[in-house]
Amino acid sequence: MNWLELIIEILLMPVIAFAVGMALLLMMRRVRARIERRVGPPLLQPLYDILKLYGKRTQISHGVLHDVGAIMVIGGYVAAEIFLPVPGFDGLAKQGDIITLFYLMMVPSLGLALGVGQCANPNGSIGIARALTSMLAYDVPFMIVIAGAALVYGTTDLTQIIAIQQQGGLSTWGLTVMPLLAVAGLISAHAMLAKEPFEIYVAPAEIATGPMVEMSGKYLGSLFVMQCFQTYTVGVLYVTLFLGGGSTWIDFLLKVFAVIFISSAVTVIFPRYKGEQAIRWLWKWPTGIALAGLAAVMML
């Protein structure tokens, strides 16, 4: 891989992730609107929201850590995008693995905690405590899923995982080979997106409580951008592990949109759990399913 290809991939991957992420967010909002018998937002509404927030004059900065936290919120996912193998671009993905990607996906939550913690607002601290607790809840089953996938494929290299799945078609997909881990992974992925019933730390009904209480203007815009990257990253990671990746951009994106569509439909059905309810549920069901799936693959 020469320097030109390296630079192109570093610059292009975040742009693609951002564009596809906005499309995924639009789909999620449209799906919810249709189920609730509403019209839904226009085509470019996610872009309008981000431009509006970044165009506002932000009056309040609570210090250097507040600004650094906003950078980490986006920077963690920007770094993660270059380690995600996509059709035609997997050079940098070969230099990392799923463990590297998993650590990078934790950076935005830690950056959010750092930034909001600088504000010394007790309501923001409540939201951060909920966010970090939720991260601990869904990371446990997801780590088990990663361990099971590594055992089945014999590697943590995402490009090799895709190659193994594509050798035999549907019969070698992770969804077919390790269905229990695929189910646990899908539930964990849904929890990562902070959608009902696991949206306790966002808690949109509690306007005065949550990480966004001290976020306005460009800071809130950064959270919108992070959501675009997060949705794309979660969808691509699941497709990579369980749906054989993609040989072309068409089938690759169809799989990613299908995964996020399932999450969108589930979101409308369930009410929000309390913090302790979400932890108890995630440590009981997806963790139990993941452990059963891990035991099953160890006996293969």
Image (spheres, helix red, strand yellow):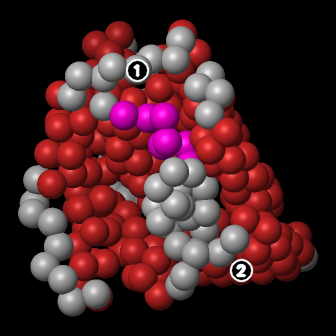
Q: Residue at x 36, y 13 (%)?
A: 2
Instruction: Indicate which label's residue lies in the foreground, 2 or 1.
Output: 1
Residue where numbered disc 2 is placed: 180
Crowding at mark 2 (Cα within 10 Å: few <14, some 14-19, many 20+): many
Mark carried by residue 127: none
Q: Is residue 63 above or below residue 115?
A: above
Instruction: Return the x and y of residue 151 as percentages of the image width and height.
Output: 79, 59
Pick whichever, 112 or 27, lies toward us: 112
Residue stretch in magenta: 210-216
Q: What is the secondary structure assignment of the residue under circle 2?
A: helix
Q: Residue at x 62, y 34 (%)?
A: 121
Crowding at mark 1 (Cα within 10 Å: few <14, some 14-19, many 20+): few
Instruction: Return the x and y of residue 152 as percentages of the image width and height.
Output: 74, 63
Mark carried by residue 60: 1
Residue 132 visible in image: no
Instruction: Return the x and y of residue 218 as percentages of the image width and height.
Output: 32, 28
